[in-house]
Structure formats: structure tokens, C-alpha cells
Image (cartoon, rainbow, N blue to C red):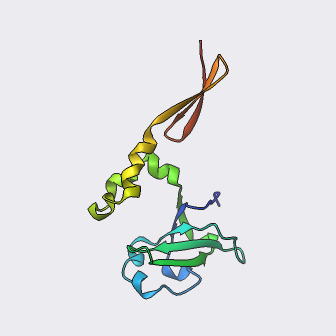
Amino acid sequence: MVEINPHDLLKIDSISALSEELPSWANSIFPNSLTVVVRRSPMRAGRIPVGVRGMKREHRFATYVDPKDVLKVTTPYELVERKAWKKTIPERQILPAIKALPKLMKFYIIIIGESVAVLVLNWQLVLVQLK
């Protein structure tokens, strides 16, 4: 199993992988994606704490999944690298959080002394030797 961290997206194999029954608002949307987000809560009985989010702010559902039911892990960094926000539905593209994502693609240079710098480009660290 790969390392799993808070905010990672997990694709699970079925609704039955969830430790609790879905709330009514999720019944129409969740089966289409089978994607949950890892929460910061501690693991419970070897299960990963995850959440299901709906279209409204109050549509949040906390539950757990067994690691064996995880088909794919996608990190927030991978979403930025793939520019995944460009592939979302138009209703989501107008959200402030989605609109801010292109700004994360910029790079930053941090100078460490006279001859070494660290380049941060698309969340990747690169050590650069200066002349």
C-alpha cells in the first residue's frame, strides 16, 4: 500500500467499502465517482478516515474505508501537476478555490548562500548550483 496523507483523494472499489451508510444527499452523486478525501482523524481498527463532500457546504459525511478497498491514491500535488481544475464542470470552475489553483503553478527561487539556490517549480524542489 502506498503512503496516504490527509487531503489525498482515494478511489474506492464500491459503496460497500464505506463503514457507514451514505446520507440521502450523497446517494445520487457518490456512486458516479466513488472518490473520498482522507481526513486528519486517526485510523480506527486499521481503517482510513475519509470524507465524502457534496455540492453544498453542509454536505459532509465522515466515514472510514479499509485500505484493501482503495484502488487509486491521488495527491493534491498530482492534481496541480495535471492541471485537473481545467477538466471540472463549469459550475466548479467559478469557485474561488478552483480559480486560485493556476497561481500554484508559479515557481519560486530561494537563495541559500552565494553559490546554491533551491528552485520550487510546480511543487518540485530542485537544487541549483549558481556560478
- Quick one: which residue is furthest to the right in this view? 45
Q: Give coordinates of residue 105: x percent, y percent.
A: 44, 41
Residue at point 33%, 62% (across, down): 92
- Quick one: which residue is furthest to the left in this view? 90
How many numbered tags mark residues here?
0
The answer to which image quadrant residue 32 occupies is: bottom left
Residue 94 located left or right of residue 73: left
Determine whether 32 is above or below 92 in the image. below
Residue at point 39%, 74% (across, down): 56
Q: Quadrant where the N terminus lies?
A: bottom right
Q: Give coordinates of residue 94: x percent, y percent.
A: 31, 58
The answer to which image quadrant residue 27 occupies is: bottom left
Q: Give coordinates of residue 10: x percent, y percent.
A: 53, 65
Most foreground residue, 102 or 11: 102
Q: Quadrant where the C terminus lies?
A: top right
Residue 23 located left or right of residue 40: left
Most foreground residue, 58 or 64: 58
Residue 95 located left or right of residue 12: left
Residue at point 71%, 74% (across, down): 46
Determine whether 99 is above or below 49 in the image. above
Most foreground residue, 40 or 43: 40
Residue at point 72%, 78% (across, down): 45
